[in-house]
């Protein structure tokens, strides 16, 4: 049996990016840039107006007052998308609209609210500072400058910036292909009537739903009975198409626990089996050729926790994410907690805030078969191996699983 930190480290060590693909921009959402992006244009591409108003020479309006307005000759207009071909001379103004290029000779835009127009005269009643309302070429992005570095997650905002510099396609690390198989002769499809001794297969649904939140391809291979030939056939088929196989059940020490046996017959290499954690102790990790197999336990709450703690960071790291870990927080545990020493316990909690501090409240019974507790929780509290008792309000480490943890911040998650 290995410790949770060791198991985590071995898992992440296996996570590698899977090659590069060139995709249409929007298909790259939530994937990760495989190269630095250099802009071949300035953004904005030219000096332009931030306001509707008049493009002027600042020296013409710098002394304007309401009693003594600057009076300029209106010599033309430049709408967004247009250009003004001549030069703005002393004493002249050009009507300009947001986004339109600043004409030659002008250096400042006076917003329309500070002016009045009469025939071909513009009265300016208040000065603005030199350069006011002018967005300079390249003030957002510089031609030749690095806009994003390799490893940047493509958020909607990154999509917008890439669009602005004309990148209709982009190179990213490819998505991992994941596969799911549940083992267990006791399993029923969810729309079958109950039968004695059988239970409905919830694990593949839980896993498919969890995987839907990640940018991966997923093949669902459903559930199979505890029969060595059936298990082997299913594993061989799955491993011929996936990068990552996630199985549930059949990794304990019982006679019908066939997952390990079959993988070993197939020549898979054991990375670890059994982790000093609760739930999820029987978890096994194998590599097979260049693929990885997560042998998760059968109990649904263990499946959920092992997915969040191992599979999700593994998948995110394989996608090239720099921030692949859950958000780590501290909270006060409501009601304290008693446990046996020797295994790290993941307690499903929900977080609230009281007097500026986070409070972790247990979300219900913590048995590894009790999935409804997971459905009420929004975080895990990690109670270390050696601890047997936590007092009310004692501080605990929290793993919070939110998309915010996937930010591109240099500092990592909050
Ligand atoms: P195992 O690790 O195969 O001994 O499975 C442990 C327990 O997990 C079983 O007794 C079932 O109650 C439960 N279980 C296994 N597979 C599933 C599944 N696909 N959906 C829901 N519960 C499951
Ligand atoms: Mg089983």
Image (tube, helix red, strand yellow):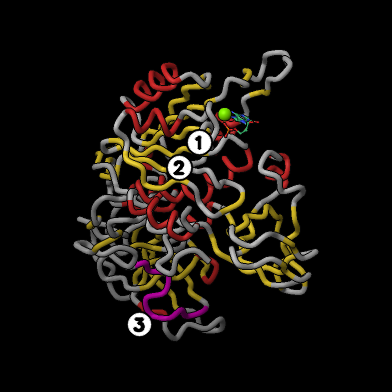
In the rendered image, residue 128 lying in the magenta stretch gets the answer: yes
Q: Is 165 drawn above or below residue 25 in the view shown?
A: below
Cα–Cα span, label 3 and label 2: 76 Å
Residue on which the image places disc 2 = 284
The span picked out in magenta is 126-135
Q: Which is more N-terminal, label 1 or label 2?
A: 1
Q: Are marks 1 and 3 in contact (CB under 8 Å)?
A: no
- Left or right? Give the position of 304 relative to 220: right
| Mark 1 residue CB less than 8 A from any atom of ligand 1 | yes
Mark carried by residue 59: 3
Q: Are marks 2 and 1 in contact (CB under 8 Å)?
A: yes
Cα–Cα span, label 1 and label 3: 81 Å
Q: Which is more N-terminal, label 3 or label 1?
A: 3
Residue on which the image places disc 1 = 251
Q: Is 246 drawn above or below residue 144 in the view shown?
A: above
Residue 91 x/y as whole percent: 34, 74
Residue at image position (71%, 69%) is 332
């Amino acid at each position: 049996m290995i410790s949770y930190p060791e198991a985590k480290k071995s898992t992440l060590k296996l996570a590698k990016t899977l090659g590069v693909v060139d995709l249409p921009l929007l298909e790259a959402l939530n994937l990760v840039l495989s190269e630095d992006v250099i802009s071949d244009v300035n953004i904005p591409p030219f000096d332009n107006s931030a306001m509707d108003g008049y493009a002027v020479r600042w020296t013409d309006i710098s002394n304007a007052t309401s009693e003594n307005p600057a009076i300029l000759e209106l010599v033309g207009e430049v709408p967004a998308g247009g250009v003004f071909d001549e030069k703005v001379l002393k004493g002249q103004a050009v009507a300009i609209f947001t986004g339109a290029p600043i004409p030659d000779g002008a250096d400042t835009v006076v917003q329309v609210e500070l002016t009045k127009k009469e025939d071909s005269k513009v009265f300016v009643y208040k000065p603005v500072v030199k350069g006011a309302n002018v967005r300079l070429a390249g003030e957002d992005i510089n031609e030749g400058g690095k806009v994003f570095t390799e490893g940047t997650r493509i958020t909607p905002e990154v999509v917008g910036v890439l669009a602005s510099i004309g990148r209709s396609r982009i190179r990213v690390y490819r998505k991992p292909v994941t596969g799911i198989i549940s083992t267990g002769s006791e399993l029923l499809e969810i729309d079958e009537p109950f039968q004695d001794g059988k239970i409905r297969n919830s694990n593949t649904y839980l896993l498919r739903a969890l995987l839907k939140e990640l940018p991966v391809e997923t093949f669902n291979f459903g559930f199979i009975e505890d029969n060595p030939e059936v298990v082997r056939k299913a594993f061989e088929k799955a491993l011929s198409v996936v990068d990552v196989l996630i199985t549930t059940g059949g990794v304990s020490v019982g006679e019908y626990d066939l997952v390990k046996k079959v993988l070993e017959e197939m020549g898979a290499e054991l990375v670890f089996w059994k982790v000093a954690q609760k739930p999820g102790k029987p978890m096994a990790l194998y590599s097979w050729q260049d693929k990885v197999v997560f042998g998760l336990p059968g109990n649904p709450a263990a499946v959920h926790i092992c997915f969040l703690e191992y599979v999700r960071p593994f998948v995110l790291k394989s996608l090239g994410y720099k921030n692949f870990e859950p958000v780590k927080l501290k909270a006060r545990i409501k009601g304290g907690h008693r446990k046996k020493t020797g295994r790290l316990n993941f307690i499903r909690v929900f977080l609230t805030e009281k007097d500026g501090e986070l409070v972790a409240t247990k979300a219900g019974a913590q048995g590894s078969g009790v999935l409804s507790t997971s459905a009420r929780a929004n975080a895990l509290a990690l109670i270390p191996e050696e601890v047997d008792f936590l007092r009310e309000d004692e501080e605990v480490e929290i793993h919070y699983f939110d998309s915010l943890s996937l930010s591109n911040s240099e500092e990592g998650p909050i």
